[in-house]
Image (cartoon, helix red, strand yellow):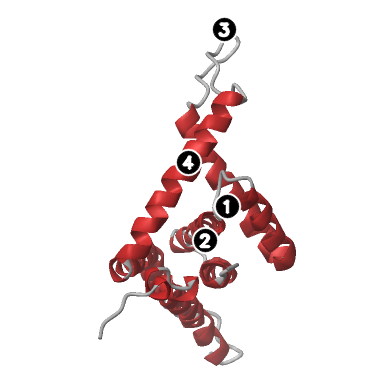
Amino acid sequence: MTATSDRLDLPARRRRHSRLIAALTSAVGACASAAQALYQPVADAPPGQEAVVVDPLPVVYLSRTAALLLEAARAADDARWPAAVGREREQAERTSAARVALARAQKIVEEPGASWPVPLPTAEQSAVIDLADVGDRVAELWRADPAQAVALVRELAAGGEFTAAEVLDAAVDATIGTALLALNDAGTTSDPSLMAERCLEAAPYLVLAVALASADLD
């Protein structure tokens, strides 16, 4: 007999994002390997040798492919859990509508006067911005104090404008974005030492993204 359970429809976040988590973990290792390709030849060179040939290609390759690999992992996760994706979209529609209503109630989208050089965001745009902002806040706080970050996520979800999973996913996005910026900087740096250092700077953010993608407050 075949049965469909709520547990299968709504997997734990660690399973829901398992391909992304695996890709993030792989990227952490790639950061270390790429940096080692720059550091190891210097470590192996005789003390009297001044010019040392190093290989920057692993860093450049990682900087150009990391975003594509992570997006492919996200797509694979979505394909594995269509029921969960559908429910997430339904929840996102409800919370977005709540944020739009709140933005209108607070008159965030009043017509700008002559003193405004650019138009204010619409209520819909404000709803998207608000989600990105809370994702940034949670990601930053998680680095310093995960317990406080969890409390903030619960507080945000209690108001009805966000779900806990939605906030955590936004925090994952923010953290991955920071890591990709570091990798981009690494790939465009000419100095080998700085290239290695900036590549390694991405690693803690990739690790944080794993923690956020795995976190399940339920």
Q: Residue at x 44, y 63 (%)?
A: 187
Does 57 appear above or below 162? below
The answer, for residue 200, to whether it is visible in the render is no
Q: At label 1, which amino acid type do we have?
A: Gly
Q: At label 2, which amino acid type do we have?
A: Val
Where residue 79 appears, as percent x and y from the top left, is 28, 67
Q: Secondary structure at mark 3?
A: loop
Q: Earlier in the sequence, mark 1 or mark 3?
A: 3
* Residue on which disc 1 sits: 135
* Residue on which disc 2 sits: 172
Q: Earlier in the sequence, mark 3 or mark 4?
A: 4
Where residue 46 appears, as percent x and y from the top left, is 56, 92
Gap between marks 4 and 1, in whole Å? 14 Å
Neighbour tally class for label 3: few under 14, some 14-19, many 20 plus, Cα within 10 Å: few
* Residue on which disc 3 sits: 114
Gap between marks 4 and 2, in whole Å? 19 Å
Tag 2–tag 1 contact (CB < 8 Å): yes
Where residue 213 appears, as percent x and y from the top left, is 51, 68
Quadrant placement of the C terminus: bottom right
Gap between marks 1 and 3, in whole Å? 33 Å
> Residue 150's image quarter?
bottom right
Neighbour tally class for label 2: few under 14, some 14-19, many 20 plus, Cα within 10 Å: many
* Mark closer to the observer (3, 4): 4
* Mark closer to the observer (2, 3): 2
Tag 4–tag 1 contact (CB < 8 Å): no
Q: At label 3, which amino acid type do we have?
A: Ala
Q: Secondary structure at mark 1?
A: helix
Quadrant placement of the N terminus: bottom left
Does 150 appear above or below 47? above
Q: Secondary structure at mark 2?
A: helix
Q: Earlier in the sequence, mark 2 or mark 3?
A: 3
Gap between marks 3 and 4, in whole Å? 30 Å
